[in-house]
Amino acid sequence: MALYDRDPASLVVADPAKGSFRVHRDAYRSAEVFEREKELIFGKCWLYLGHDSELAKKGDFHARRVGGRDIIFNRDKNGAVGAHYNTCTHRAAKVCRERTGNARTFTCPYHGWVFNSEGKLASQNAKTGYHDDINADGHLDLRSVERLEEYRGFWFVNFNPKAISLYDYLDNARDAIDALMDQTEAKQVILSGEHTYSINANYKLLCENSYDGYHLFPVHASYFDFLRDQLEGTPAAALIDQTLADYTTMGAVRALGNGHAILDSYVPTGRPVAQWLPSFGPEVKPEIEGKYARLVERFGEERANYIATTQKNLVIFPNLVINDILSVTVRIIEPESENRIRVTAWAMGPTDESDTLRAMRLDNFVSFLGPAGFGSPDDIEMLELCQTAASHTPVEWSEISKGFGKSEDPCHASGAPDDEIQMQAYWTMWDRVMNGKIKLEVE
Amino acid sequence: MVMTRTEAEDVLFHEAELLDAWELMDWAAMYTPDSLYEVTSPACADPYGADAANTLFLISDKYDRITGRAKRLMKKTAHAEYPHSKTRHMVSNVRVTGGEGDETKCRANFAVFRTKEDNSTIYMGEAFFTIAGSGTDARILHKRCVLDLNSLYNQGRLTIIL
Ligand code: FES
Ligand SMILES: [Fe+2]
């Protein structure tokens, strides 16, 4: 795409006085820009690896690709969580070939080197030829990822040894994660099953879409039609149109620092924790209302109301989406090139919900979300339309100005749910990281 | 009466024909208010025994979503299938595996080809059916599709009906 390439220093152009915020389309369509992102964004930011609950037992592991790097995410025999590069220190073969499982050791299929669950080299499968102290300095152990830290069970890696802490990096996104994890006094866990699929679009297009309040009605009209059909004849029928009419005046988009942002909105789908709607059926009403009452006891009315009734679409810069909506999904976006991504999404839920509510949570999930739901595929179609059109037309700029200019720092702005404040925060951070305007490093 | 293999094939071939013709409301009419249409997730550890009540599926449609899916896909606002992709459902290796009264259990291999714009992809796997009645009165009570995939990496999404 050299045809379009331009200086990355000027890909994001903001003019607060004019309320103008523009992103050059090379940021989506240029292979050269993507090469720089691999180094500057994915090499320096904290990237989500997996959730603590996915490693329930000692020895549990998942082989994942994160930021282009293959990693074994596991719990060792002492119970500690590890992240090791999935390559043999001998002559490079991939040591773990299963996507998931439980293992006391990892044996390289090539020459039989054996690594224990902590990544230590346990055997070279050879009686002669090696000095006894050849691994005295540990350089033949599986290489650990430079940094591995967690916040409330969400494990992240960073490939920069000098990176600031995950805690500092998450900034106000911590509060959004708290609102999710505080839904239960038991544990929030990743539920069985996952969705893995691909999209022919730049990773940032999916980030933008994941908390875009502006696209809701044009893209998801057919989903709202379905909701209306479902509720027809019930007292909740009028709720849909009424809530949708209020959509732009209730809730907000809020930037949370460091490019993270959240869309807080009100969409009448109901929420397992904790907003009951007639479409859920009477049998779970006491349970959901009980959960709400308990939240009020624990956090007071205002916070409980926020936790329970607000639909939250959170994007943690640069590629983690946590949607706490009609169901909870944790979604990572793994870029493969400037125009292709692999998406992996999981459902999350608390361990202390009834079987009925659990079933409803999962049913809600597949009704809208995932590659076969009534919502996400239409989003995906939009992203692919954006990608193909940006790649095959000479038009330079995308206009992301809605709501812009009201705040000094776009990374700490807020606005109406259908504003583009969250994307302005994202792109401001992107520009800062790409152009060295923010370090994300301790001295 | 439990159907013979040929009778079961007639039902499955009819379903395939409706789907390829995008006669989706007629397709939905092959289902009943007690029906269930499921596609397990490719990542599912035990796709035959899995239960959508505790495991994430790709599709788990009771009747309201079976008809809802058909209705939605016929709208221009179902962007993912606008314009409609071309599909070809191949149904083979049909085996009647059991049943009683007027219910028949059968399984079949399937390969569904989908072309959207210039891209063609394949959804292949095995489907498990419980069917009530036979002939034009046959109604599908349960259909579970198990894909021979590890992800939808090549297919991207599953917006057609298998
Ligand atoms: S490459 Fe792993 S043992 Fe040789
Ligand atoms: Fe959407």
Image (tube, rainbow, N blue to C red):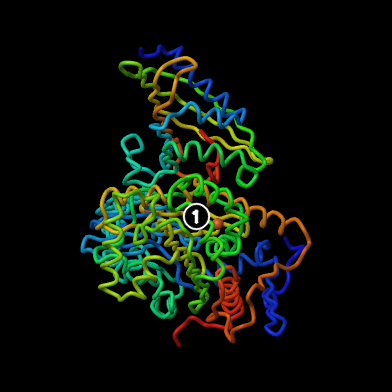
Rendered-image quarter of ligand 2: bottom right
Nearest the eye: A63 or A311: A311
Query: Does the image show residue A194?
Result: yes
Relative to A378, A111 lies left or right? left
Q: Which residue is mark 1?
A: A238
Of all residues, the one furthest to the left in this rendering is: A78
Identify the residue shown where x is 36% and y is 64%.
A83
* Rendering coords of residue A215 (x, y %): 60, 60
How far from the left and from the top, in percent, is residue B118? Answer: 68, 40
Which chain contains the residue that carries disc 1? A
Q: For the point 49% across and 49% down, which residue is it?
A: A227
Instruction: Indicate the secondary structure of the residue bearing disc 1.
Output: helix
Q: Nearer the viewer, residue A247 or A165?
A: A247
Please indicate, yes or no, whether residue A87 appears anywhere in the rendered image.
no
**In the displayed structure, would residue A377 be above or below residue B25?**
below
| Distance from mark 1 CB to nearest ligand 2 atom below 8 Å | no
Quadrant that contains the N terminus of chain A: bottom right
Q: Quadrant of residue B146?
A: top left
Give amino acid for label 1. Ala
